[in-house]
Amino acid sequence: MSFDSAPESSILEIHLFGVGNVGGSLLDQIHRQQPILRRRGLDLRVCTLGGSRRMLTSDPQSDQGLDLKNWRSELQASSIPSDFEGTLQRAQAHRTKTSVLVDCSTSPVLATRYADAFRHHLHVVTSNKRTNSGPRADYDEVRTAARRHGQRFLYETNVGAGLPVIDTLQNLVATGDRCLRFEGILSGSLSFILGLLESGIPFSQAVRQALDAGYTESDPREDLSGLDAARKLVILAREMGHALDLEELPVQGLLPSGFDASGSLPEFLTRLENLDEDFAQRIAKLDGQRLRYVATWTPTEAQVSPRAVDPNHPLAAIRSAENALCFHTERYQPHPLIIRGYGAGAQVTAAGVLSDILRLAAPSLSLRAGAA
Ligand SMILES: NC(=O)c1ccc[n+]([C@@H]2O[C@H](COP(=O)([O-])OP(=O)(O)OC[C@H]3O[C@@H](n4cnc5c(N)ncnc54)[C@H](OP(=O)(O)O)[C@@H]3O)[C@@H](O)[C@H]2O)c1
């Protein structure tokens, strides 16, 4: 690949861990946008990409970043073991460039390493929700480390995938508004599954379709148990300045309480067929109401659970992997501020991650906005 020369470009070096649905789409989007962004004054260079076992790194001599044309086959053939520590050190050696660690993995371990990345002078962009929904001490440590080292921590895709949720909420809070009540559908995968059930698709098939479409976590039990939606509500509450912890949030999953959800993923998916009739009956008994997976929050109580809502309720129309977030605030009342749109899926989530990356370079991009 020949690189357009852009001598006055800002250079942003990307070190990406997690190249599954989201990370893979991100690389494809970066590859497509690279020439356009270069003309607008931003040279996005992917210097590291990898998963839990192997990775690719750019040649430090050429200083151009990886050519992304055949990254999948090259990663497949790579014999370089995945090395997070070495990546941080290599990035730090390039202190003249702006560098960002991008975490699109499902790893709980990587999520504990962001403070190290800040110490090595990298910004962090993550779609991985584990740090922001995890123990308070880790949550605080990451923010303290980012401030101390003058680095940025961006995680817009933690809630609502590519929807502008975190930024909107941070702006509300920073300008002195206060959230009084929140109600919403935070799980795109459950929104997709419940929508399919309404169309008569058996429950076990709906779950498989959601998994195949990349709407669920790699193990859909995270979604079906309500854990994924609960993580998002914890993140929202914390953004609103409330110290909610995952352990204290009442969570009712979508699966019946006695159902055996153990075993390997294929075993679990097969066993789901035993619930097809139950769910068909549950939907039939709703008598015009809609089953939705709803998260609610006030300063004194919060919960996530399935709920039957009237057909004229604002959340009744939310299906097909959409999310809807209704913030009832001091300023937004009696009508709430509503954010609605697709809240799961690799493409929209990757676009949200790329937007966060571009925010790190916003001044250089906006100066040349007319040059696209
Ligand atoms: N999909 C969505 O709609 C969506 C929306 C919002 C947020 N997210 C979040 O985005 C992240 C990625 O989601 P996804 O759908 O892309 O998941 P995925 O397809 O399962 O991909 C996850 C990737 O993480 C990698 N990984 C696991 N442990 C790792 C480690 N220690 N170091 C490096 N890589 C590691 C895996 O690599 P190996 O295969 O090599 O193990 C895998 O490629 C998750 O945290 C998810 O919660 C997803």
Image (tube, helix red, strand yellow):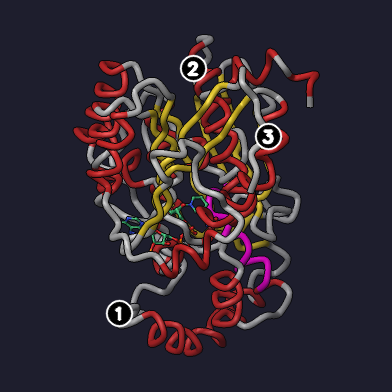
Q: What x and y, as percent, mark residue 78?
A: 39, 65
Calculate the distance from the C-alpha at mark 3 to the C-alpha at mark 2.
42 Å
Name the residue type under label 2: Val
Residue toward you, 352 or 252:
352
Q: Which residue is mark 1?
A: 262
The quarter of the displayed image where residue 297 is located: top left
Residue drawn where x is 30% and y is 79% of the image: 262
Q: Quarter containing ligand 1?
A: bottom left
240 shown above or below 71: above
Camera-near label (3 vs 2) is 3
Element type at marker 2?
helix
Q: Which residue is mark 3?
A: 4
Q: Main secondary structure of the magenta part?
A: helix
81 shown above or below 268: above
Q: Which residue is mark 2?
A: 173
Name the residue type under label 3: Asp
Q: What segment carries the magenta color?
A: 185-196
Query: Is residue 299 visible to the viewer in this orientation of the structure?
Result: no
**Residue 153 magenta-drawn?**
no
Residue toward you, 66 or 193:
66
Left or right position of 108 against 336: left
For mark 1, does the 10 Å Cα neighbourhood hold few (<14), some (14 to 19), or many (20 or more) residues? few
Query: Is residue 289 visible to the viewer in this orientation of the structure?
Result: yes
The quarter of the displayed image where residue 197 is located: bottom right
